[in-house]
Image (tube, rainbow, N blue to C red):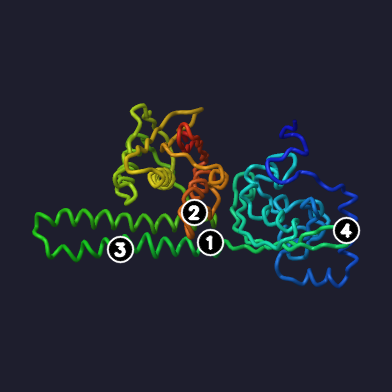
Amino acid sequence: MTGRNDPLYTEFAPAERSSPDEIERQARLFVDMGLLHQFLDAIPTALMVLNKNRQIVFANRPLIQATGQDSQQALLGLRPGETLGCIHSATHVGGCGTTRFCRECGAVRAILSSLSGRQAVEECRVIRHKDDEQFESLDLRVWTTPLPYEVEQFVVFSLVDIGHEKRRQALEHIFFHDILNTVSTLRLASEMLPKNEPDDQKQLFDAIAISSERLAQEILTQRDLLAAENNELETKATPIHSGEFLQKMIQSASALPAAQGRDIRISPAAAQIEFFSDAVLLGRVILNMIKNAVEASAPDQTVSIDCQAAENQVEFSVHNPNYIPPAVQHQIFQRSFSTKGKGRGLGTYSMKLLSEQYLKGQVSFVSTKENGTTFFARYPFF
């Protein structure tokens, strides 16, 4: 029985690696193919050749430059996730491809497909550390092609960054769907105003006010997310009372279309805590947590919100009674992943980005069939 510290332990793809001598021998095969070597270097797309153990035996110049290396020597023997700095590639001793998260990785699936003799095209989401405190999320499209040579099996692996494409899809959905729906509500209410008696107009004024606020917040949220990704977001810490803060979150969440018929409540045991944070950014995180819980719930179900002091931090939690399948759990917090379809996927990602890079906090979740799903967000008191 192998444990996680065993070099051969894996939860998905084989962990075995070729010896350094074997890697060097295979690398020389491509060095000796002078014209092929020059041809692959001339391709503007980052490209690598992998052996049967998914290790690099050739890297073209665009890939070497993208990883900040001077030559391919530093990359030989690494796997793609290790080359890109994927946070999961260091989880097990076996490295890239051996964790439960790798089961949903398009890059690993494509490589295994080509090792079986088939071409493949997949999308891949990678979270990697930029430094000790910051991370970045990559959206990649990868292509793999079998490359048999004599008795050996290699795979040509190329990749391009499609983050701009995913961002465009998300913004198109937000502006062409979410914001357009809000604008439609505003227009309908404004058109009905002159046609109604004064006693009925107050309800229309309230609808206009709510829709206007929702529209402004949606635009400001996207502005802040773009600034956060560009490291341009400024924070301003002010005193926050947890009870009053959660009441505002409930009020905002209850106005969401998805909240209709759902019971959103604050736990009776919720603590009353005074702390310092950026109220606007914190509100974006907690409201996203509530929104996700509401959208995952049926009309007759309850979404419960709690606040407790935990290890000299304030901890917010949002619970709904439904279970997240493992395949979805493994991809939560990835930039473009969403269970809501194409062009979504910024909600949980923004929670992680704002919390961990700007609010000095941490977000996590637990989901079981017995107890449902709870998202947690912890922040320092000061």
Mark earlier in primary sequence (4, 2) = 4
Quadrant in the rendering for residue 250: top left
Q: Nearer the viewer, mark 4 or mark 3?
A: 4
Quadrant in the rendering for residue 187: bottom left
Residue 242 appears at what percent x and percent y?
A: 37, 35
Residue, disc 2: 345
Residue, disc 4: 151
Q: Residues within 10 Å of mark 2 (few under 14, many from 20)?
A: many
Q: Residues within 10 Å of mark 3 (few under 14, many from 20)?
A: some
Q: Is residue 367 above or below residue 287?
A: above
Residue type, mark 1 in image: Lys
Residue, disc 1: 166
Residue at image point 83% right, 71% down:
38
Q: At numbered mark 1, what does the secondary structure look like: helix, strand or loop?
A: helix
Q: Is label 4 in contact with label 1 (beta carbons under 8 Å)? A: no
The image's mark for residue 183 is 3
Q: Is residue 282 visible?
A: no
Q: At numbered mark 2, what does the secondary structure look like: helix, strand or loop?
A: loop
Quadrant in the rendering for residue 181: bottom left
Residue 371 appears at what percent x and percent y?
A: 46, 32
Mark earlier in primary sequence (4, 3) = 4
Mark earlier in primary sequence (1, 2) = 1
Left or right side of 26 for 46:
left
Q: Residues within 10 Å of mark 1 (few under 14, many from 20)?
A: many
Residue type, mark 4 in image: Val
